[in-house]
Amino acid sequence: MISKIITIYSEEMLKKYLQTDEFKRHIKSSISVFVQIFSSDRDPSWIMSIDAALRMTIPVAVVVGVTTMGEIAEGRLFINTTVISLAFFEKTRVQGFLITCDNDNEKDLGNKFSGEIEKTCSEIAGVMLLATPFTMNVSDFLMGYSSGRSGKYPVFGGGAGDYKAVQEPLITLNGNYTSKGVLAVVFMGNDIQIDMHTYLGWQPLSKEMIITETDGHWVKKIDNIPAFDVFHRYLDIQNDKDFFLNVLEFPLLLKRNGIQYAKAPMEVNSENAIKFITDLKEGDRLYRLR
């Protein structure tokens, strides 16, 4: 596999790269190409124009797009840009799937989605999932996906974001897009090995805290006080339109099944409960991070 990452601010910058000898050489030696578009601009017309330019030049490519809250390239963070990652495979096959969540039964949807993938694809080496966590219940979807998965291949991925306080993320696949759904990219063949590792890097900042009351994805109380107070009282974070952006710097640390996770809440309600995109349970032990 050969990987290339470019940062663009216009369609012309992309087209210029697609005309280079380097790009043509990579295409000539590849049986499949996987392209990821990480865009600060949520306008579907922008991502679709990039998508169209790529697929016109690389008809065999699987092209996915995702809106972000910050783009990473060259080992640093970019703001208000579009980063494009291209992976050229000499032997590995790649196939994409996109599903829109039209109802609230995400668990059943995940079960059916994994079944469709395994029915369609062979020699699965791994599956990447990209979802819209602010507009659907991703936790339930993953539970359903896991229950329907028969193979032992690794599953990994992430969620789309949005620079705006009101999160309206977007994911795209080969000219189609949705603001409420999941896309999958399946890697197939015996010549690719996918290893999964977790990297946290955060340090506990507080004493241990215990979740004492929940309601679905809402954590109502931590140590028997309104959950929002953990952020407001100690960090002076306000319940306003910038809550999510501010709280990203101070997630909560949860240890489950021997693995540590950093969990950042999405919003606050009138009862000072805080909402997460994944399920947290009464009795879970947490720390504030830095």
Image (tube, rainbow, N blue to C red):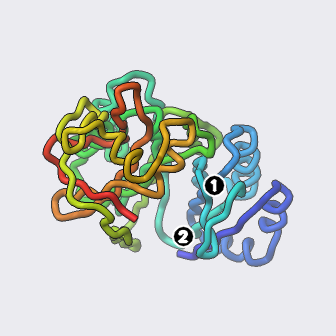
Residue 144 or 164: which is nearer the viewer?
A: 164
Residue 33 relative to residue 260: left or right: right
| Name of the residue lying farthest toward the left | 283
**Mark 2, residue position:** 89
Instruction: Give coordinates of residue 105: x percent, y percent.
Output: 32, 25
- Looking at the rendered image, the quarter that the C terminus falls into is bottom left
Tell me how far mark 2 sits from mark 1, CA to CA. Answer: 18 Å
Instruction: Give coordinates of residue 4: x percent, y percent.
Output: 64, 72
| Name of the residue lying farthest toward the top | 103
Using the image, determine if residue 49 lies above or below residue 18: above
Residue 34 or 77: which is nearer the viewer?
A: 77
Amino acid type, residue under disc 2 in the picture = Phe
Mark 2: few/some/many CA within 10 Å (<14, 14-19, 20+): many
Using the image, determine if residue 155 lies above or below residue 4: above
Residue 74 relative to residue 249: left or right: right
Give the label, 2 or 1, closer to the camera.
1
Picture residue at 58% right of the left edge, 53% below the top:
62
Picture residue at 36% right of the left edge, 60% below the top:
126
Amino acid type, residue under disc 1 in the picture = Ile
- SS state under label 1: strand
